[in-house]
Amino acid sequence: MFDAITQGGDPLRLFGIASAVLSIYAFYPYARDVVRGRTQPQRACWLIWSVLGSIALVSQIVEGATESLWFAAIQVGWTVVIFGLAIWRGQGRFLNPGDESILAAAAIGLGLWATTDSAAYALFITISISMLGGAATIAKAYRAPGTETMSTWVISWAASACAICAVGSLDRVLLAYPLYLLCLYTGIILAMAMGRNRGRQVVFSTTRRTAGDLM
């Protein structure tokens, strides 16, 4: 890895290293804020992401991912760490109503993988159902933006973009996971920005109303 940095290396490897380094750094502020009680991850979301991310990682290995694999491995590793912290400092149940069906769908994906010898089935099924967990986090980011860490999602967005570039070809299987995460992180960032703006508008309206009452 370090030879590619010091000696130039090929662009795909450099993009892969950049995505890995950004991913390593991205979740540190999130983990720190969870420990301090500033960020409160949804337990159910991070449990589902841990399971589905692990399946996606193994399927990418089987499908021959190389330079973009660093990104997927570190993202999954951090996801498991955050879930561990969520057990301690998170919010919500471990499994919400309907989450059992999500895990059952993941099992179906694994079954298709075993019977067809194609990891693509497992990958696309896990990405599809992972979107449900992502939607819950996006809704939470809009409703309570103060319970999320913006820097984590912005850096993760950049890491996803680098991982997409590291694939180096229009391989839909290898592009699927980083492209999905890029869209997910975009949604979370926009939801947080909109939630913060809504909060400022509420404060501004309340201040104006209070000032009017005093006059």
Image: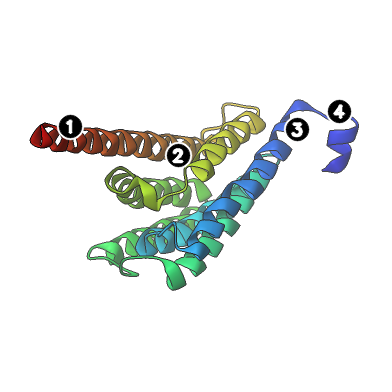
- CA separation, marks 2 and 3? 22 Å
Residue indicated by mark 4: 8
Badge nearest the viewer, 2 or 3: 2
Residue indicated by mark 2: 185
Badge nearest the viewer, 4 or 1: 1
- CA separation, marks 2 and 4? 30 Å
Which residue corresponds to the image point at 49% horizontal and 61% vertical from the top-left? 34
* Residue 105 x, y percent position in the rendering: 34, 58
Residue type at the position of mark 3: Leu
Q: Pointers 2 and 1 in contact (CB under 8 A)?
A: no
* SS for dot 2: helix
| Above or below for 59 versus 46 | above
* SS for dot 4: loop
Residue indicated by mark 1: 208
Q: Pointers 3 and 4 in contact (CB under 8 A)?
A: no
Question: Which of the two discs, 4 and 1, labels the residue nearer the N terminus?
Answer: 4
- CA separation, marks 3 and 4? 8 Å
Question: Which of the two discs, 3 and 4, labels the residue nearer the N terminus?
Answer: 4
- The local crowd at label 1, few if under 14, some if 14 to 19, many if 20 or more residues have their Cα within 10 Å, is few
Question: Which of the two discs, 2 and 1, labels the residue nearer the N terminus?
Answer: 2
Which residue is nearer to you in this view: 171 or 177? Answer: 177
Which residue is nearer to you in this view: 41 or 112? Answer: 41
**Which corner quadrant holds the N terminus?**
top right
Q: Pointers 2 and 3 in contact (CB under 8 A)?
A: no
| Above or below for 100 versus 61 | below
Residue indicated by mark 3: 14
